[in-house]
Amino acid sequence: MKKIGVLVSGGGTNLQALIDSEKRGELIGGKLSCVISSKEGAYALERAAQNGIKGITLPRKDYSDTASYTRAITDTLIAEGIDIVVYAGFMTILDEQIVRQFPYKMLNVHPALIPSFCGKGFYGLHVHEEVLKRGVKVTGATVHFVTEVCDGGPIVLQKAVDVRNDDTPETLQRRVMEECEWKLLPQAVSLLCQDRITVKDNVAYAN
């Protein structure tokens, strides 16, 4: 049984999707073991507490630079015996230290169909604002491996939804979360826990 560590910064809706998946018996081969928040008072920590999952707060503001903060996160994950790391609304950039410690063992969910609307500056509601501004007709979510390149790791799973004429960034964000993110992330984590994802030439294959 692989131990899963979840990194969060806010409300934790994707964390809740993982918790619900585990309760349904769908998180095969893995167990949610700890939640680490980059912000004090994040509601995601409350979700963890309500479900008997260890919560740890490591405020980004307490560290002088990215390197020292990455080391603190990495050391904490190692100390907790974590096998799989999941970014679930984690809004802090970490450096290569954590990637080298957990190669192809870290997953992130991004609220767009990578390689569109991704990279620096594309996070949260900004993504959906840009989608609407460009007038694309289809968007969605992507679960990918975390590497040293922001949103550049091998794509594990993707799911699409239609963009509606009357959408606002908020309504589109909600649909992408409900129909894509909350379904894809638990599915990808379960596959990784079962060693059912392989990577060759920067392409991920799930079986």
Image (cartoon, rainbow, N blue to C red):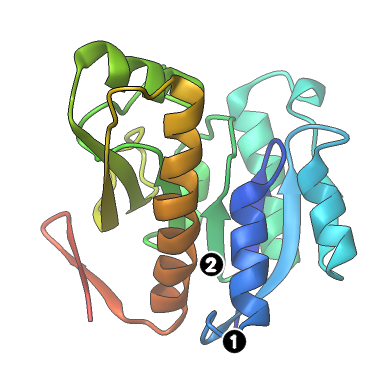
Residue plotted at (46% across, 26% down)? 123
Quadrant of the rendering where the N terminus is positioned: bottom right
The residue closer to the viewer here, 57 or 173, is: 173
The residue closer to the viewer here, 69 or 189, is: 189
Residue plotted at (45% across, 49% down)? 108
Q: Are marks 1 and 2 in contact (CB under 8 Å)?
A: no
Kindly state the secondary structure of the residue where label 1 is placed: loop
On the rendered structure, is 107 left or right of 158? right
Kindly state the secondary structure of the residue where label 2 is placed: strand
Q: Farthest residue toward the left?
A: 201
Whether residue 192 is situated above or below residue 152 in the rendered picture: below
Q: Quadrant of residue 78?
A: bottom right
Classify mark 1: residues with Cα within 10 Å, few (<14), some (14-19) or many (20+): few
On the rendered structure, is 48 left or right of 173? right
Which circle, 1 or 2, is nearer the viewer? 1
Q: Residue 135's mark? A: none
On the rendered structure, is 96 left or right of 7? left
Q: Farthest residue toward the front?
A: 166
Amino acid type, mark 1 = Gly
Residue plotted at (47% across, 78% down)? 193
Q: Earlier in the sequence, mark 1 or mark 2?
A: 1
Q: CA distance from mark 1 to mark 2?
A: 18 Å
Q: Position of residue 185 (x, y in %)?
A: 46, 60
Q: Position of residue 152 (x, y in %)?
A: 27, 39
Q: Position of residue 92 (x, y in %)?
A: 59, 30
Residue identifier under label 2: 84
Q: Position of residue 138 (x, y in %)?
A: 20, 36
- Tell me, yes or no, if residue 105 can be seen here: no
Amino acid type, mark 2 = Ile
Residue plotted at (72% across, 40% down)? 11
Residue identifier under label 1: 25
